Image (tube, rainbow, N blue to C red):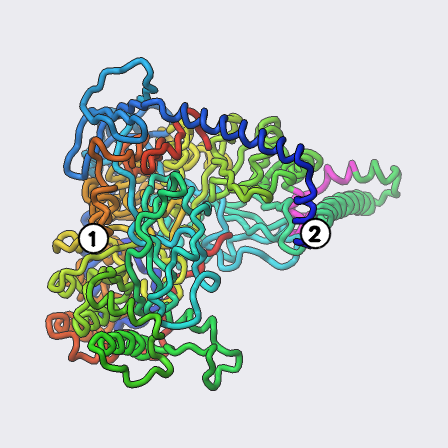
């Protein structure tokens, strides 16, 4: 079938090819013209500009020229060829950053790796669809940069990646390998059952190991233990069941050496304490993901200087966390308590989307006690620092590529939406002219 | 009415807000319950007392109908709103509630839900004789959540699966029995143009036709029989053709002569009760309008729409009947060829069509959309006027249920269903501070045990009522909790954590699972 199709294509006459080429050329020209229109400098006036959470300019104006922030000032005089946007009550902030997102792939069975419990050699970048609607929705909502975390199906999961949610294809990926995530708790245990043989008995290559937290921690320790031995030039005692594959070991060593940032997803107090214990055992530095019960481990987190990517915030748990029973001790006060204790905390929407995506997570956080500045920091500067991209995103400065959001009012209110979103210099969402869509 | 509610409120005062936790109550030793009740009644008496008048003083008043008063008073007397204004003179014995820096707003109105019912759908397709009264479960958490979120009127109607469901009613989320909770009964019959899954529209419409034909036939036969019976009683012979006999018989017919199973349906065709007609898709709207017109209840009809039904906006506009919008608010359509998603914000389109609409809460959501005010805020975000957005959660749903004269705004003479908010109703940081149902305080945020627990610091949660699982109420469990916090300071490595985790829940006691909130 395919071959015949190809033959047909080859059979097309040269005139037809010429026509297609001409059409393509015209289209390219049109596209170029469209770009030319976009490159008109844009002057955005706002009631408030958050340069960073603790540096507010009010009122303010930003001139975006050729995709760069040309000037930020309280007033900027209008030049003739400038498009002026003035929404009256607008606020401008840096583009939001979700440091623990699941955008671009499907959680659960489909995009979870079942080959092994320890897969730090694999990259989530290879499974995510950068053109998926997930990213478009995020960009429209005002989220410009995300760390895409792999599915929590494996004890030691794949490498996460930092990507922009929109913009030219060649500039989307900021960092291919930005971290490796381990998961503690019920989730790898539960998801391992996807791959269990039907008769439940006996072991086979389809049967995955952990069925309890004991097994899970065993896989974790075995993996890093083997990596430690290999790093010392010794041969690990066994390479049997439950051992990391030879491909995984170099990456585990990199994690041990701190060359790849390490993250652990844990929700319940039990799992968070286990994570801390394991990190001490292997001298690992890590960032805690989700941390539903983190407010119960304040002292331990503080003592070990562990940053937390907290969230999502919810009234009722949805998704896998509902089934794990690890969300029962969720508290509204958790985020406030973490900040009060001086723990570095970023907010994340995790696998929730739509009205629970990152801007509204910041809104929820404000509802349960954070100030607007704290909430803003938790979705801009703090995640930028955690991801090591503080010079690219998270705050505004002239000379930088425009990565900013123009909000219709105070950010993170239920009545406010992102009117304009710039991602890395390109205007990817503009709702100022039309409404109701 | 007032006295029954008054009694109810006293019960309410003596019981903590989360009285809907039978497990907790069961576990509590009787003595503890009695001591608790005694303490609470002492605390409660001085405030509720027998005050008939309550003055909500110095708050910002958003009456929904009329202009906002930046600083004003609302006087509640005998369960009704007695006066609203910048300065209201209160009787000497009025309980004055300081509302400075607070916002006074009418209790919000949930226009249509099957939540609160034990089972929303009966299995036979035509059940107009049923009443949701029999399925309302006052102990559902749903009511407590509604109260906390300021939703003080809930129109409970049967689900969407039956062709003709039962009779609905409007309840307030407080009370121990459906009777106590009832604000108004016999509101509307639920009809569904959209068939339940696995059934088709042809059969659905055939069922409607058959039902109404049967009703018509039965009524004719009954009228004829009534006339004949009357003649027989008078000792006369039948003197007129059947049509005339039916006509004369209908005049003789007393309401109680109509079989109970037909009464609601007959009332519907006579335009005496309302119809909430569920139209999930745009194609159902025209059918719904036709059906309502054919059977004489068009003027009593409210259309309950799915997200896609906005495409029939023109037909709806021509019909001019109010609509209840799907909780999703956004209709997402994926182009089958390109995979591109097109999103349509439905309330904006309905609002532009000039229709009155009501918003619903989305129970599949994790947080924001579970609040009615949040749904209204989303409308404002997308360009619906603030006035209309506020009406869509208060006055319009009240009018749809025929209670516009009693509820939905702060106007003199209306029921005193009032919420006192900490800020603007559409503000992210606003919470319901107090709620009044028919002039009786039914919610006080500082006494909301569940909210306290959610905001508690770990060190605060040692008391029996604020235990971590909300279940550990016995003395034993109390001890375990204390230990848990003592252990926190010790080296966590040494402690067998499993051991500590056990014992929080008595053996055999079921763990409370988060409810399945997947869609309607």
Q: Nearer the viewer, residue A225 or B7?
A: A225
Residue at position x 29%, y 69% from top? A250
Q: Nearer the viewer, residue B446 or B249?
A: B446
Vertically, is B278 above or below A312? above
**Magenta stretch contains residue A378:** no
Q: Position of residue A335 (x, y in %)?
A: 22, 53
Task: Read off the chain for label 1.
Answer: A
Where does label 2 land, which residue? Answer: A4
Element type at marker 2? helix
Vertically, is A57 above or below A166? above
Task: Read off the chain for label 2.
Answer: A
Mark 2 or 1, which is nearer the eye? Answer: 2
**Quarter holding residue A252:** bottom left
Q: Position of residue A5 (x, y in %)?
A: 68, 49
Residue projecting furthest to the top? A80
Q: Position of residue B304 (x, y in %)?
A: 55, 41
**Quarter holding residue A274:** bottom left
Q: Position of residue A209 (x, y in %)?
A: 39, 78
């Amino acid at each position: 079938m395919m071959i015949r199709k190809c033959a047909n294509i080859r059979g097309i006459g040269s005139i037809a090819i010429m026509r297609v080429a001409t059409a393509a050329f015209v289209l390219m020209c049109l596209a170029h013209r469209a770009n030319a229109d976009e490159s008109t400098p844009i002057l955005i006036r706002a009631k408030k500009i958050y340069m960073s959470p603790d540096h507010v300019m009010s009122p303010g104006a930003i001139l975006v020229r050729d995709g760069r922030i040309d000037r930020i000032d309280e007033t900027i005089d209008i030049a003739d060829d400038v498009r002026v946007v003035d929404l009256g009550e607008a606020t401008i902030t840096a583009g939001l950053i979700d440091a623990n997102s699941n955008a671009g792939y499907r959680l659960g069975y489909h995009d979870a790796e079942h080959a092994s419990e320890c897969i730090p050699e694999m990259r989530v970048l290879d499974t995510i669809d950068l053109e998926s609607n997930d990213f478009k929705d995020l960009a429209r909502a005002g989220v410009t940069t995300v760390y895409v975390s792999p599915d929590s199906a494996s004890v030691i999961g794949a490498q996460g990646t930092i990507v922009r949610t929109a913009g030219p294809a060649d500039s989307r990926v900021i960092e291919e390998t930005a971290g490796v995530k381990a998961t503690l708790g019920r989730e790898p245990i539960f998801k391992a059952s996807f791959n269990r043989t039907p008769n439940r008995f006996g072991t086979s290559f389809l049967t995955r190991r952990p069925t309890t937290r004991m097994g899970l921690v065993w896989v974790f320790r075995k993996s890093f233990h083997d990596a430690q031995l290999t790093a010392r030039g010794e041969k690990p005692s066994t390479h049997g069941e439950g051992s990391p594959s030879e491909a995984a070991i170099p990456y585990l060593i990199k994690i041990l050496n701190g060359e790849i940032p390490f993250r652990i997803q844990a929700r319940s107090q039990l799992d968070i304490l286990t994570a801390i214990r394991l990190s001490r055992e292997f001298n690992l530095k890590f960032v805690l993901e989700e941390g539903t019960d983190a407010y119960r481990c304040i002292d331990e987190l503080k003592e070990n200087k562990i940053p937390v990517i907290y969230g999502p915030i919810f009234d009722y748990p949805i998704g896998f966390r509902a089934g794990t029973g690890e969300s029962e001790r969720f508290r509204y006060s958790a985020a406030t308590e973490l900040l009060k204790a001086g723990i570095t905390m970023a907010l994340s929407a995790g696998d929730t989307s739509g009205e629970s995506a990152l801007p509204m997570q910041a809104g929820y956080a404000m509802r349960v006690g954070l100030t607007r500045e704290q909430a803003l920091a938790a979705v801009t500067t703090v995640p930028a620092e955690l991801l090591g991209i503080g010079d690219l995103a998270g705050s505004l400065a002239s000379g930088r590529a425009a990565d900013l959001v123009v909000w219709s009012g105070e950010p993170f209110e239920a009545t406010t939406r992102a009117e304009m979103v710039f991602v890395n210099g390109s205007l990817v969402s503009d709702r100022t002219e039309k409404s109701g869509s | 009415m007032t006295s029954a509610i008054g009694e109810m409120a006293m019960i309410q005062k003596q019981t903590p807000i989360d009285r809907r936790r039978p497990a907790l109550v069961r576990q509590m030793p009787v003595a503890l319950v009695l001591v608790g009740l005694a303490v609470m009644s002492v605390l409660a008496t001085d405030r509720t007392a027998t005050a008939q008048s309550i003055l909500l003083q110095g708050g910002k008043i958003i009456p929904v109908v009329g202009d906002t008063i930046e600083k004003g008073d609302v006087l509640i007397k005998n369960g009704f709103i007695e006066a609203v204004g910048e300065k209201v003179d209160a009787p000497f014995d009025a309980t004055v509630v300081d509302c400075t820096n607070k916002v006074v707003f009418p209790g919000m109105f949930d226009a249509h839900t099957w939540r609160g019912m034990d089972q929303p759908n009966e299995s036979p397709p035509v059940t107009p004789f049923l009443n949701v009264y029999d399925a309302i479960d006052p102990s559902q958490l749903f009511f407590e959540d509604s109260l906390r979120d300021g939703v003080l009127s809930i129109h409970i109607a049967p689900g969407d699966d039956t062709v003709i469901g039962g009779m609905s009613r409007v309840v307030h989320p407080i009370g121990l029995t459906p009777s106590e909770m009832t604000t108004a009964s016999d509101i509307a019959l639920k009809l569904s143009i959209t068939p339940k899954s696995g059934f088709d529209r042809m059969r659905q419409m055939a069922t409607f036709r058959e039902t109404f034909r049967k009703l018509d036939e039965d009524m004719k036969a009954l009228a004829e029989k009534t006339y004949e019976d009357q003649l027989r009683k008078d000792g006369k012979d039948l003197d007129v053709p059947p049509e005339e006999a039916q006509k004369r018989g209908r005049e003789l017919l007393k309401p109680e002569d109509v079989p109970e199973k037909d009464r609601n349906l007959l009332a519907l065709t006579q335009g005496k009760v309302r119809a909430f007609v569920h139209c999930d898709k745009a194609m159902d709207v025209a059918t719904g309008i036709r059906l309502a017109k054919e059977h004489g209840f068009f003027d009593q009809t409210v259309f309950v729409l799915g997200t896609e039904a906005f495409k029939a906006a023109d037909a709806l506009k021509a019909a001019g009947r109010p609509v209840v919008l799907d909780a999703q608010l956004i209709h997402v359509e994926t182009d089958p060829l390109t995979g591109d998603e097109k999103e349509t914000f439905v309330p904006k389109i309905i609002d532009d069509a000039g229709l009155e609409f009501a918003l619903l809460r989305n129970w599949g959501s994790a947080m924001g959309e579970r609040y009615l005010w949040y749904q209204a805020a989303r409308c404002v975000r997308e360009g619906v006027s603030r006035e209309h957005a506020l009406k869509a959660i208060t006055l319009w749903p009240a009018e749809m249920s025929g209670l516009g004269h009693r509820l939905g705004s702060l106007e003199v003479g209306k029921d005193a269903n009032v919420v006192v908010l900490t800020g603007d109703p559409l503000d992210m940081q606003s919470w319901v501070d107090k709620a009044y149902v028919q002039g009786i305080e039914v919610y006080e945020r500082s006494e909301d045990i569940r909210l306290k627990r959610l905001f508690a610091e770990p060190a605060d949660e040692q008391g029996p009522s604020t235990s971590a699982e909300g279940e550990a109420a016995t003395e034993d469990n109390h001890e375990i909790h204390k230990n848990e916090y003592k252990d926190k300071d010790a080296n966590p490595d040494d402690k067998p954590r499993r051991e500590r985790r056990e014992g929080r829940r008595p053996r055999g006691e079921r763990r409370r699972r988060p409810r399945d909130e997947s869609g309607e």
